[in-house]
Image (cartoon, rainbow, N blue to C red):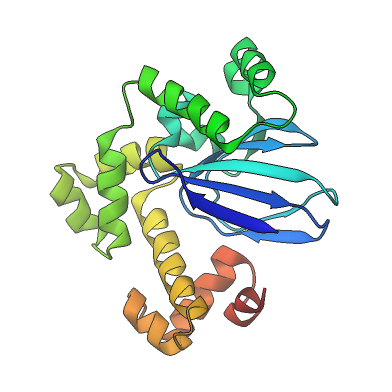
Amino acid sequence: MYRERRAALPGAVLWTSVSTGGPVRVLPDGCLDLLWSSRSGLLVAGPDRTAHVSAGTPGERWLGLRLPPGTGPAVFGVPAGELRDRRIPLDALWGRAADEVAERLGDRPTAGALEAVAAARLSAAGGPDPLGSRVAALLDAGVSVTATAAEVGLGPRALHRRSLALFGYGPKTLARILRMRRAVALARAGVPLAEAAARSGYADQAHLTRDVRELAGVPPSKLLAG
């Protein structure tokens, strides 16, 4: 019941789903989402430190725009850290502007219309902070936090401070989340866990298992089965 595709916004993903009423486990990814629910209207999903488990109403329709790490703050107008581990109505951030957006989108917005809202906000903000994509790409490639800081010309404290605003957490946490996602993607593609762990930068399979338990809330076997 879940579908996704690339959005026109660089690095963004458009997705749709219809809830069955059962729990859905969403892994952390350093992203912020602009959401529409047939039950709750327009919402913002902040960056999660651990998996977010939601249980929607059966038949509830969802449309979402997942913004790449570092882009959300420019769209929503607040640092990512203020939205960490939160799901809030859009009007809590945009006030009357959110009401105008909701009226314009109507009762059943299209993916293109939702993306146009984010694109307009991003353009008005002058685009995303380019540091976000640089840092996220380096960490996702397995570059150490120390080497990443040096590559972008920042000291460790400055990188941590900027990361809190861009991603909702520090670079070490983001690197850990991205590493887990790399390993899980490999495992879902059929790569044995031990090999997936080694290829993703883990010391061993046990190290991967601990991270999955802590970040996803379940062991790898249950996560992959789901």
Q: Residue at x 81, y 60 (%)?
A: 22
Q: Residue at x 56, y 31 (%)?
A: 114
In the picture, measured across the screen, residue 106 lies left or right of residue 76, that is: right
Is 140 placed above or below 30 here? below
Residue 18 percent coordinates (x, y)? 74, 51
Is 103 placed above or below 224 here? above
Is 47 placed above or below 140 here? above
Residue 27 percent coordinates (x, y)? 56, 59
Q: Nearer the viewer, residue 92 or 57?
A: 57
> Hey, which quadrant is residue 40 in on the image?
top right
Is 155 placed above or below 28 here? above
Q: Nearer the viewer, residue 115 or 68?
A: 115
Residue 46 percent coordinates (x, y)? 56, 40
* Total numbered badges shown on the rendered structure: 0
Q: Nearer the viewer, residue 160 or 221?
A: 221
In the picture, measured across the screen, residue 19 lies left or right of residue 128, that is: right
**In the image, farthest residue toward the top:** 96
Residue 123 percent coordinates (x, y)? 36, 22
Q: Residue at x 58, y 18 (%)?
A: 94
In the picture, measured across the screen, residue 18 lies left or right of residue 150, that is: right
In the picture, measured across the screen, residue 55 lies left or right of residue 209, that is: right
Quadrant containing the C terminus is bottom right
Quadrant containing the N terminus is bottom right
